[in-house]
Image (cartoon, rainbow, N blue to C red):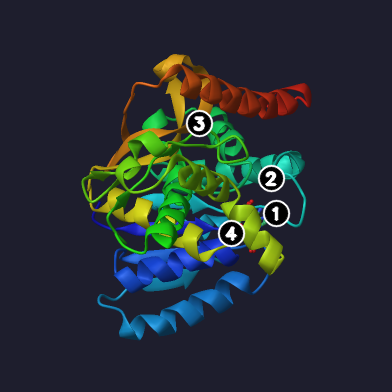
Amino acid sequence: MTKRKVGIIGAGAVGATAAYSLSMMGTCGEIVLFDIAEGVAKGKAIDIGQSTHYAPNSTIITAAETPADVSECDIVVITAGVPRKGDMTREDLLMINAKIMKSVVEDVMQYSPDAVIICVSNPLDVMTYVIGQMTGWERNRIIGLSGALDGARMAYQIYKKLGFGAGQIGTLVIGDHGQNMIPLPQEVQVGSVDVAELLSKEEMEEIIERTKNGGAEIVRHLGTSGYYAPGRAIAYMVEAILNDSKVVVACSALLEGEYGYSDVAVGVPVVLGKNGMEQIIEIALDDETKAKFKTSVESIQSGIEVLRNNQFFN
Ligand code: APR
Protein backbone atom coordinates (compact mmCIF):
# COMPACT_ATOMS: atom_id res chain seq x y z
CA MET A 1 0.00 0.00 0.00
CA THR A 2 2.16 2.77 -1.28
CA LYS A 3 -0.42 5.51 -1.54
CA ARG A 4 -1.95 4.99 1.87
CA LYS A 5 -5.04 6.74 0.54
CA VAL A 6 -8.24 6.51 2.53
CA GLY A 7 -11.66 7.63 1.34
CA ILE A 8 -14.33 8.53 3.85
CA ILE A 9 -17.86 8.64 2.46
CA GLY A 10 -20.07 10.54 4.87
CA ALA A 11 -18.12 13.37 6.48
CA GLY A 12 -20.53 13.77 9.39
CA ALA A 13 -19.60 13.46 13.03
CA VAL A 14 -18.10 9.97 12.87
CA GLY A 15 -16.47 10.26 9.44
CA ALA A 16 -14.79 13.56 10.22
CA THR A 17 -13.62 12.36 13.64
CA ALA A 18 -12.07 9.29 12.03
CA ALA A 19 -10.29 11.58 9.56
CA TYR A 20 -9.07 13.81 12.38
CA SER A 21 -7.86 10.85 14.43
CA LEU A 22 -6.00 9.40 11.43
CA SER A 23 -4.41 12.72 10.58
CA MET A 24 -3.23 13.22 14.18
CA MET A 25 -1.56 9.81 14.03
CA GLY A 26 -0.05 10.62 10.63
CA THR A 27 -1.10 7.21 9.34
CA CYS A 28 -2.24 8.10 5.83
CA GLY A 29 -0.71 9.81 2.84
CA GLU A 30 -4.07 11.20 1.79
CA ILE A 31 -7.59 11.27 3.14
CA VAL A 32 -10.41 12.26 0.84
CA LEU A 33 -13.78 13.18 2.32
CA PHE A 34 -17.08 13.03 0.49
CA ASP A 35 -20.50 14.04 1.75
CA ILE A 36 -23.77 14.53 -0.03
CA ALA A 37 -24.53 17.66 2.00
CA GLU A 38 -22.99 20.60 0.23
CA GLY A 39 -20.03 22.22 1.92
CA VAL A 40 -19.66 19.59 4.66
CA ALA A 41 -16.70 17.70 3.16
CA LYS A 42 -15.04 20.91 1.95
CA GLY A 43 -15.36 22.72 5.27
CA LYS A 44 -14.17 19.78 7.34
CA ALA A 45 -11.30 18.99 4.97
CA ILE A 46 -10.03 22.56 5.36
CA ASP A 47 -10.42 22.50 9.15
CA ILE A 48 -8.72 19.11 9.57
CA GLY A 49 -6.07 20.10 7.01
CA GLN A 50 -5.17 23.11 9.12
CA SER A 51 -4.89 20.93 12.24
CA THR A 52 -2.26 18.74 10.58
CA HIS A 53 0.32 21.49 11.02
CA TYR A 54 0.81 20.10 14.53
CA ALA A 55 0.62 16.41 13.57
CA PRO A 56 3.67 14.11 13.60
CA ASN A 57 3.46 13.43 9.84
CA SER A 58 1.75 15.40 7.12
CA THR A 59 -1.48 14.09 5.66
CA ILE A 60 -3.15 15.61 2.63
CA ILE A 61 -6.84 16.12 3.37
CA THR A 62 -9.05 16.79 0.38
CA ALA A 63 -12.76 17.09 -0.28
CA ALA A 64 -14.32 15.24 -3.19
CA GLU A 65 -16.69 17.27 -5.31
CA THR A 66 -18.24 14.10 -6.72
CA PRO A 67 -18.07 10.38 -5.82
CA ALA A 68 -15.68 9.98 -8.78
CA ASP A 69 -13.07 11.97 -6.83
CA VAL A 70 -12.94 9.23 -4.17
CA SER A 71 -10.75 7.16 -6.45
CA GLU A 72 -7.95 4.63 -6.16
CA CYS A 73 -8.31 4.40 -2.39
CA ASP A 74 -6.65 1.61 -0.40
CA ILE A 75 -9.47 1.77 2.14
CA VAL A 76 -12.93 3.31 1.91
CA VAL A 77 -14.79 3.97 5.14
CA ILE A 78 -18.55 4.31 4.70
CA THR A 79 -20.40 6.26 7.37
CA ALA A 80 -23.01 7.68 5.02
CA GLY A 81 -26.45 7.34 6.44
CA VAL A 82 -28.86 8.65 8.97
CA PRO A 83 -27.67 8.36 12.58
CA ARG A 84 -29.80 6.77 15.27
CA LYS A 85 -31.62 9.43 17.24
CA GLY A 86 -33.59 9.33 20.51
CA ASP A 87 -35.49 6.09 20.87
CA MET A 88 -35.22 5.23 17.17
CA THR A 89 -34.15 1.60 16.86
CA ARG A 90 -31.37 0.49 14.56
CA GLU A 91 -33.95 -1.42 12.57
CA ASP A 92 -35.92 1.79 11.89
CA LEU A 93 -32.92 2.93 9.93
CA LEU A 94 -32.73 -0.18 7.86
CA MET A 95 -34.47 0.73 4.62
CA ILE A 96 -33.18 4.33 4.52
CA ASN A 97 -29.58 3.37 5.09
CA ALA A 98 -29.70 0.32 2.82
CA LYS A 99 -30.73 2.53 -0.11
CA ILE A 100 -27.97 5.01 0.67
CA MET A 101 -25.53 2.11 0.95
CA LYS A 102 -26.52 0.74 -2.43
CA SER A 103 -25.69 3.97 -4.26
CA VAL A 104 -22.47 4.53 -2.30
CA VAL A 105 -21.23 0.99 -2.95
CA GLU A 106 -21.84 1.33 -6.70
CA ASP A 107 -19.50 4.33 -6.66
CA VAL A 108 -16.85 2.54 -4.59
CA MET A 109 -16.89 -0.43 -6.97
CA GLN A 110 -16.38 1.92 -9.90
CA TYR A 111 -13.78 4.30 -8.51
CA SER A 112 -11.87 2.31 -5.86
CA PRO A 113 -12.22 -1.25 -7.14
CA ASP A 114 -9.29 -2.60 -5.12
CA ALA A 115 -10.22 -1.05 -1.78
CA VAL A 116 -10.95 -2.64 1.56
CA ILE A 117 -14.34 -1.31 2.72
CA ILE A 118 -14.97 -0.54 6.38
CA CYS A 119 -18.69 -0.25 6.99
CA VAL A 120 -19.84 2.05 9.79
CA SER A 121 -23.45 2.80 8.84
CA ASN A 122 -26.16 1.18 10.93
CA PRO A 123 -27.66 -1.32 11.34
CA LEU A 124 -24.05 -2.30 11.06
CA ASP A 125 -24.09 -6.04 10.45
CA VAL A 126 -26.93 -5.85 7.94
CA MET A 127 -25.17 -3.02 6.07
CA THR A 128 -21.96 -5.08 6.01
CA TYR A 129 -23.95 -7.94 4.51
CA VAL A 130 -25.46 -5.53 1.95
CA ILE A 131 -21.94 -4.52 0.88
CA GLY A 132 -21.01 -8.18 0.50
CA GLN A 133 -24.07 -8.79 -1.67
CA MET A 134 -23.67 -5.64 -3.76
CA THR A 135 -19.97 -6.02 -4.48
CA GLY A 136 -19.56 -9.77 -4.73
CA TRP A 137 -15.97 -9.10 -3.59
CA GLU A 138 -13.83 -11.56 -1.64
CA ARG A 139 -14.98 -11.29 1.95
CA ASN A 140 -11.60 -10.23 3.31
CA ARG A 141 -12.18 -6.80 1.76
CA ILE A 142 -15.44 -6.17 3.62
CA ILE A 143 -15.55 -5.52 7.35
CA GLY A 144 -17.79 -3.64 9.71
CA LEU A 145 -16.97 -1.55 12.77
CA SER A 146 -18.47 -3.30 15.76
CA GLY A 147 -16.24 -5.07 18.29
CA ALA A 148 -13.42 -2.53 17.99
CA LEU A 149 -15.87 0.06 19.34
CA ASP A 150 -17.89 -2.14 21.70
CA GLY A 151 -14.67 -3.61 23.11
CA ALA A 152 -13.34 -0.10 23.79
CA ARG A 153 -16.60 0.73 25.54
CA MET A 154 -16.29 -2.40 27.67
CA ALA A 155 -12.67 -1.59 28.53
CA TYR A 156 -13.76 1.91 29.55
CA GLN A 157 -16.34 0.52 31.97
CA ILE A 158 -13.80 -1.90 33.47
CA TYR A 159 -11.24 0.86 33.90
CA LYS A 160 -13.82 3.09 35.58
CA LYS A 161 -14.59 0.33 38.06
CA LEU A 162 -10.96 -0.65 38.75
CA GLY A 163 -9.22 2.70 38.53
CA PHE A 164 -6.13 1.04 37.05
CA GLY A 165 -4.99 -0.94 34.03
CA ALA A 166 -5.75 1.69 31.36
CA GLY A 167 -4.44 0.53 28.00
CA GLN A 168 -3.95 -2.99 29.37
CA ILE A 169 -7.54 -4.16 29.35
CA GLY A 170 -8.14 -6.83 26.73
CA THR A 171 -11.83 -7.23 25.93
CA LEU A 172 -13.84 -9.17 23.40
CA VAL A 173 -17.37 -8.34 22.26
CA ILE A 174 -18.91 -10.55 19.60
CA GLY A 175 -22.35 -10.86 18.01
CA ASP A 176 -24.35 -8.06 16.47
CA HIS A 177 -23.54 -4.38 16.95
CA GLY A 178 -26.83 -3.79 18.75
CA GLN A 179 -28.91 -4.86 21.70
CA ASN A 180 -27.87 -8.51 21.37
CA MET A 181 -24.13 -7.87 21.39
CA ILE A 182 -22.18 -10.33 23.52
CA PRO A 183 -19.46 -8.92 25.77
CA LEU A 184 -17.40 -11.92 26.91
CA PRO A 185 -16.16 -11.42 30.50
CA GLN A 186 -14.47 -14.84 30.43
CA GLU A 187 -12.08 -13.47 27.78
CA VAL A 188 -11.16 -10.28 29.66
CA GLN A 189 -7.68 -9.80 31.08
CA VAL A 190 -6.09 -6.79 32.73
CA GLY A 191 -2.40 -7.02 32.08
CA SER A 192 -2.22 -10.78 32.15
CA VAL A 193 -4.56 -11.07 35.11
CA ASP A 194 -7.92 -12.73 34.64
CA VAL A 195 -10.60 -10.12 35.34
CA ALA A 196 -12.42 -12.60 37.62
CA GLU A 197 -9.56 -12.03 40.10
CA LEU A 198 -10.35 -8.33 40.16
CA LEU A 199 -14.10 -7.89 39.81
CA SER A 200 -17.07 -9.74 41.28
CA LYS A 201 -19.71 -11.41 39.12
CA GLU A 202 -22.17 -8.65 40.04
CA GLU A 203 -19.73 -5.93 39.07
CA MET A 204 -19.10 -7.69 35.76
CA GLU A 205 -22.82 -7.96 35.09
CA GLU A 206 -23.16 -4.22 35.58
CA ILE A 207 -20.25 -3.64 33.20
CA ILE A 208 -21.87 -5.87 30.58
CA GLU A 209 -25.13 -3.93 30.82
CA ARG A 210 -23.34 -0.59 30.57
CA THR A 211 -21.33 -1.83 27.59
CA LYS A 212 -24.47 -2.91 25.79
CA ASN A 213 -26.04 0.47 26.49
CA GLY A 214 -22.82 2.39 25.84
CA GLY A 215 -24.17 3.97 22.66
CA ALA A 216 -27.65 4.68 24.03
CA GLU A 217 -26.21 6.32 27.16
CA ILE A 218 -24.45 8.89 24.97
CA VAL A 219 -27.59 9.49 22.91
CA ARG A 220 -29.46 10.17 26.16
CA HIS A 221 -27.02 12.89 27.19
CA LEU A 222 -26.12 14.31 23.81
CA GLY A 223 -29.27 13.81 21.78
CA THR A 224 -27.15 12.15 19.10
CA SER A 225 -24.77 9.20 18.85
CA GLY A 226 -21.18 9.33 19.99
CA TYR A 227 -18.40 9.99 17.53
CA TYR A 228 -15.06 10.21 19.33
CA ALA A 229 -14.91 6.53 20.26
CA PRO A 230 -16.29 5.38 16.88
CA GLY A 231 -13.89 7.71 15.05
CA ARG A 232 -10.90 6.43 17.00
CA ALA A 233 -11.97 2.79 16.58
CA ILE A 234 -12.23 3.29 12.80
CA ALA A 235 -8.77 4.87 12.79
CA TYR A 236 -7.42 1.88 14.73
CA MET A 237 -8.78 -0.51 12.09
CA VAL A 238 -7.41 1.63 9.24
CA GLU A 239 -3.97 1.74 10.91
CA ALA A 240 -3.97 -2.04 11.34
CA ILE A 241 -4.67 -2.53 7.62
CA LEU A 242 -2.29 0.15 6.28
CA ASN A 243 0.50 -0.95 8.63
CA ASP A 244 -0.20 -4.66 8.09
CA SER A 245 -0.23 -5.00 11.88
CA LYS A 246 -2.07 -8.35 12.09
CA VAL A 247 -3.94 -7.23 15.19
CA VAL A 248 -6.74 -9.33 16.61
CA VAL A 249 -9.94 -7.35 17.04
CA ALA A 250 -13.62 -8.15 16.70
CA CYS A 251 -15.25 -6.94 13.48
CA SER A 252 -18.39 -7.70 11.59
CA ALA A 253 -17.34 -10.28 9.01
CA LEU A 254 -19.12 -12.38 6.41
CA LEU A 255 -19.25 -15.93 7.74
CA GLU A 256 -18.79 -18.95 5.51
CA GLY A 257 -19.46 -21.72 7.97
CA GLU A 258 -17.47 -20.32 10.91
CA TYR A 259 -19.32 -20.58 14.20
CA GLY A 260 -21.87 -22.71 12.33
CA TYR A 261 -23.29 -19.89 10.18
CA SER A 262 -23.13 -18.70 6.58
CA ASP A 263 -24.71 -15.95 4.51
CA VAL A 264 -24.64 -13.43 7.34
CA ALA A 265 -22.25 -10.78 8.68
CA VAL A 266 -21.71 -10.74 12.44
CA GLY A 267 -19.08 -9.66 14.94
CA VAL A 268 -16.32 -12.22 15.50
CA PRO A 269 -12.62 -11.94 16.35
CA VAL A 270 -10.52 -11.47 13.21
CA VAL A 271 -6.97 -10.69 12.20
CA LEU A 272 -6.55 -7.33 10.43
CA GLY A 273 -3.65 -6.82 8.04
CA LYS A 274 -2.89 -5.47 4.60
CA ASN A 275 -5.50 -7.69 2.97
CA GLY A 276 -8.21 -6.48 5.32
CA MET A 277 -9.84 -9.27 7.28
CA GLU A 278 -7.15 -11.91 6.88
CA GLN A 279 -8.52 -14.57 9.16
CA ILE A 280 -11.55 -15.31 11.29
CA ILE A 281 -10.58 -16.72 14.67
CA GLU A 282 -12.97 -19.35 15.94
CA ILE A 283 -12.94 -19.45 19.72
CA ALA A 284 -14.73 -22.13 21.69
CA LEU A 285 -18.09 -20.88 22.94
CA ASP A 286 -19.86 -22.42 25.93
CA ASP A 287 -23.51 -23.41 25.53
CA GLU A 288 -24.84 -20.18 27.04
CA THR A 289 -22.73 -18.04 24.70
CA LYS A 290 -23.69 -20.21 21.72
CA ALA A 291 -27.35 -19.52 22.50
CA LYS A 292 -26.68 -15.78 22.75
CA PHE A 293 -24.76 -15.88 19.48
CA LYS A 294 -27.71 -17.63 17.83
CA THR A 295 -30.07 -14.88 19.03
CA SER A 296 -27.65 -12.29 17.75
CA VAL A 297 -27.34 -13.92 14.32
CA GLU A 298 -31.12 -14.31 14.11
CA SER A 299 -31.62 -10.60 14.81
CA ILE A 300 -29.29 -9.80 11.89
CA GLN A 301 -30.97 -12.39 9.66
CA SER A 302 -34.35 -10.78 10.40
CA GLY A 303 -32.94 -7.44 9.17
CA ILE A 304 -31.68 -9.13 6.00
CA GLU A 305 -35.11 -10.71 5.64
CA VAL A 306 -36.79 -7.28 5.78
CA LEU A 307 -34.60 -6.20 2.86
CA ARG A 308 -35.34 -9.43 0.96
CA ASN A 309 -39.06 -8.98 1.50
CA ASN A 310 -38.77 -5.48 0.08
CA GLN A 311 -37.02 -6.86 -3.02
CA PHE A 312 -33.89 -4.94 -2.10
CA PHE A 313 -31.47 -7.49 -3.54
CA ASN A 314 -33.36 -8.00 -6.85
N1 APR B 1 -23.38 10.03 0.23
C1 APR B 1 -22.50 10.69 1.03
N2 APR B 1 -22.81 11.14 2.26
C2 APR B 1 -24.05 10.92 2.69
C3 APR B 1 -25.02 10.24 1.92
C4 APR B 1 -24.63 9.79 0.63
N3 APR B 1 -25.49 9.15 -0.16
N4 APR B 1 -26.16 10.19 2.65
C5 APR B 1 -25.92 10.80 3.82
N5 APR B 1 -24.64 11.24 3.86
C6 APR B 1 -23.93 11.94 4.91
C7 APR B 1 -24.78 12.99 5.62
O1 APR B 1 -24.86 14.18 4.88
C8 APR B 1 -23.99 13.16 6.92
O2 APR B 1 -23.06 14.23 6.85
O3 APR B 1 -23.57 11.04 5.93
C9 APR B 1 -23.24 11.83 7.07
C10 APR B 1 -23.61 11.09 8.33
O4 APR B 1 -23.12 11.83 9.37
P1 APR B 1 -23.95 12.17 10.68
O5 APR B 1 -25.37 12.44 10.33
O6 APR B 1 -23.20 13.18 11.45
O7 APR B 1 -23.96 10.76 11.44
P2 APR B 1 -22.77 10.14 12.31
O8 APR B 1 -23.04 10.40 13.75
O9 APR B 1 -21.48 10.52 11.73
O10 APR B 1 -23.05 8.60 12.06
C11 APR B 1 -22.68 8.00 10.82
O11 APR B 1 -22.58 5.85 11.78
O12 APR B 1 -23.31 5.07 13.80
C12 APR B 1 -23.58 5.13 12.44
O13 APR B 1 -25.95 4.93 12.14
C13 APR B 1 -24.89 5.84 12.18
O14 APR B 1 -25.13 5.59 9.86
C14 APR B 1 -24.66 6.46 10.86
C15 APR B 1 -23.16 6.60 10.75
Q: Which badge, 3 or 1, is on the more N-terminal residue?
A: 1
Q: Which badge, 1 or 2, is on the more N-terminal residue?
A: 1
Give x and y (percent) for residue 147. Answer: 45, 43
Question: What numbered label is drawn on residue 10?
Answer: 4
Q: Which three-letter amino acid code belongs to the residue tagged 4? A: Gly
Left or right: 75 with respect to 57? Answer: right
The Cα atoms of the two marked residues, 3 and 1, are separated by: 21 Å
Q: Which three-letter amino acid code belongs to the residue tagged 3? A: Val
User: In this figure, which residue is indicated by the disc labeled 3?
Assistant: 266
Q: Is mark 1 within 8 Å of ligand 1?
A: yes
User: In this figure, which residue is indicated by the disc labeled 1?
Assistant: 82
Point out the frontmost of discs 4 and 1.
1
Q: Is mark 4 within 8 Å of ligand 1?
A: yes
The Cα atoms of the two marked residues, 1 and 2, are separated by: 7 Å
Q: Which badge, 3 or 2, is on the more N-terminal residue?
A: 2
The Cα atoms of the two marked residues, 4 and 2, are separated by: 12 Å
Q: Is mark 3 within 8 Å of ligand 1?
A: no
Q: Are the residues flagged by discs 1 and 2 in contact, CB closer than 8 Å?
A: yes
Query: In the displayed structure, would residue 311 be above or below residue 73?
Result: above
- Asked which quadrant contains residue 79, the reply is bottom right
Q: Which badge, 4 or 2, is on the more N-terminal residue?
A: 4
Query: In the displayed structure, would residue 218 be above or below residue 254?
Result: below
Left or right: 105 with respect to 70? Answer: right
Q: Which three-letter amino acid code belongs to the residue tagged 2? A: Asn
Question: What numbered label is drawn on residue 97?
Answer: 2
Identify the residue at image location x=31%, y=28%. 281
Q: Which badge, 4 or 1, is on the more N-terminal residue?
A: 4
Q: Residues within 10 Å of mark 3 (few under 14, many from 20)?
A: many
Point out the frontmost of discs 3 and 1.
3
